[in-house]
Image (cartoon, grey):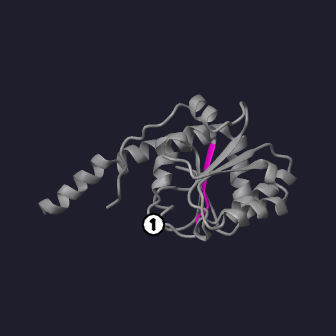
Amino acid sequence: MHNGIAPADLLGRTEARNALQIPLGTNVIGALGELTWNKNYPVLIRAAGILKREGKEFLIYIIGDGEEAAFLQTLAEEVGVAEHIRFLGFVPDARKYMRAFDIFVLPSLKEGLPYVLLEAGAAKLPLIGSRIPGIEEVITHKETGLLFDVHNERGLADALTLFHEDTFLREVVSTALHKKVQSEFSLAHMAEKTANVYAH
């Protein structure tokens, strides 16, 4: 039985981008979560290095704070992508800014059922996640998002490039995921299944 989420109170795209000071016309990759070992942000930073070497235009906005903040900022400088990554730190009620992003990435090493993916799906964002249990309950590759092997920065860079270049695929999978979240991961669906368990 999956957990469910309530309907999200999301800002519109323009309002969310203004609040996060995102320049107009920028291709923004978003991530949201604590800056800890488990969230595996080094693979995203190294994938950003690949994108830069291949001449891609992008910015990465990471919302969250944690014990690896200084390490990740240093790594971004070492990889040569510090100017492409914005570490925003802790932002209250961060999920309401989801629509500021063009693509959402969750590169975790392990997860239960990640609420942040459900929230991003509710915002109708195209998602990229690592190929691990929990994330695979939400994302089916090329149906409701894209998956990459957890330590493979080349695979993540390729997934980001595919979404950036194939806007049709991006629209198809984000729409499919949005419908999946509404039908399978709503509070109403969770309550109905819970009631059925107690009834039997």
Q: In terms of secondary structure, what is the magenta stretch mainly?
A: strand
- For the residue labelled by badge 1, is the local secondary structure a helix, a strand or a loop? loop
Q: Which residue is mark 1?
A: 112
| Residue 3 placement, left or right of 90 | left
Quarter holding the N terminus is bottom left
The amino acid type of the residue labelled 1 equals: Gly
| Residue 9 placement, left or right of 89 | left
Answer few, some or many: residues within 10 Å of disc 1's Cα (few below 14, many 20 plus, some between 14 and 19): few
- Residue 157, image quadrant: bottom right
Residue 162 is situated, as x and y percent measured from the top left of the image, at: 70, 48
Quarter holding the C terminus is bottom left
Q: Is residue 92 above or below residue 74?
A: above
Q: What residue is drawn where x is 35% and y is 57%?
A: 3
| Residue 79 placement, left or right of 106 | right
Q: Is residue 107 above or below residue 57?
A: below
For this rendering, which residue is in front, 89 or 103?
89
- Residue 103, image quadrant: top right
Q: What residue is drawn where x is 59% and y is 55%?
A: 64
Residue 33 is situated, as x and y percent measured from the top left of the image, at: 56, 57
Q: Is residue 4 above or below residue 23?
A: below
Magenta stretch: give its range: 103-108
For this rendering, which residue is in front, 186 or 82?
82
For this rendering, which residue is in front, 152 or 123?
123
Q: What residue is drawn where x is 76% and y is 44%?
A: 58
Residue 177 is situated, as x and y percent measured from the top left of the image, at: 48, 46
Residue 31 is situated, as x and y percent measured from the top left of the image, at: 61, 52
How many numbered discs, if any? Answer: 1
- Report if residue 127 lies within the magenta region: no
Q: What residue is drawn where x is 37% and y is 51%?
A: 185
